């Protein structure tokens, strides 16, 4: 039986815990975005766009769409964290998405209609660090999962995803 199918026998790998943990954080952030008090300017929250005056923790510009994206991203982490390849795709792929969002936040006029997410400078910095952090977790923990608990490399067919070089 391959490692992908036998993780329940050996326990979960650190990359899976990381994916589930990151997903749980996004889920909590998505929920908090809908709670008045935690979200300042709650009455000014719009579905999307820079016109929304709602700020999560008084720092991060949010909208209903932004909160829904966090909720979906959180659920994706919980589901994809159930498998080794899913965990890797979630962390690395999600990290890439956040780096693209960071670049988007740098080039878009924050007061224009193109800022539909909505974003502000605090969001941009957060997206940069999230992107780098998620990719780093995905790469480092994926490589760690290619070595068994005895410190020996597993055969290619037993490596996560069946790849010869994780």
Image (tube, helix red, strand yellow):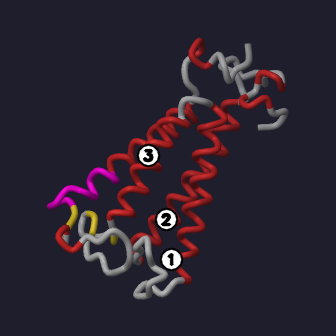
The residue located at (66%, 19%) in the rendering is 5
Q: Position of residue 143 (x, y in %)?
A: 70, 37
Q: Is residue 137 left or right of residue 115?
A: right
Question: In percent of the image, x 51 and y 39: which residue is there?
Answer: 18
Dot placed on the residue nearer the N-terminal end, 1 or 2:
1
Mark 2 or mark 3: name the one nearer the start of the chain. Answer: 3
Q: Nearer the viewer, mark 2 or mark 3?
A: 3
In the rendered image, which residue does mark 2 sit on? 127
Please tell me in which quadrant of the rendered image residue 110 appears.
bottom left
Disc number for residue 105: 1
Could you tell me how far apart the alpha carbons at marks 2 and 3 are, in whole angstroms? 15 Å
Q: Nearer the viewer, residue 1 or 147?
A: 1
- Specify whether residue 36 is painted magenta: yes
Q: Is disc 3 surrounded by few (<14), some (14 to 19) or many (20+) residues within 10 Å?
A: many
Query: Mark 3 sits on what residue?
Result: 74
Residue 76 against residue 112 in the figure, above or below: above
Tag on residue 9?
none
Q: Answer with mark 3 or mark 1, whichever residue precedes in sequence.
A: 3
Up/down of 112 relative to 63, above or below = below
In the picture as drawn, the residue positioned furthest to the front comes out as: 47
Magenta stretch: includes residue 95? no
Kindly check if marks 1 and 2 are in contact, taking CB atoms under 8 A apart as contact.
yes
What segment carries the magenta color?
29-38
Is 137 drawn above or below residue 86 in the view shown? below
């Amino acid at each position: 039986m391959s490692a992908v199918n036998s993780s329940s026998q050996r326990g979960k790998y650190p990359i899976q815990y990381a994916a589930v943990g990151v997903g749980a954080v996004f889920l909590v952030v998505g929920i908090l975005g809908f709670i008045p008090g935690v979200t300042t300017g709650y009455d000014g929250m719009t579905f999307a766009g820079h016109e929304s005056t709602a700020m999560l923790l008084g720092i991060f510009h949010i909208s209903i769409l932004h909160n829904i994206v966090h909720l979906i991203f959180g659920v994706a982490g919980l589901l994809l964290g159930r498998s080794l390849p899913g965990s890797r795709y979630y962390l690395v792929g999600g990290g890439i998405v956040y780096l693209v969002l960071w670049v988007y936040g740098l080039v878009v006029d924050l007061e224009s209609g193109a800022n539909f997410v909505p974003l502000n400078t605090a969001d941009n910095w957060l997206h940069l660090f999230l992107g780098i952090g998620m990719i780093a977790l995905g790469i480092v923990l994926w490589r760690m999962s290619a070595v068994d608990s005895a410190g020996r490399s597993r055969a290619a067919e037993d490596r996560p995803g069946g790849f010869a070089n994780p």
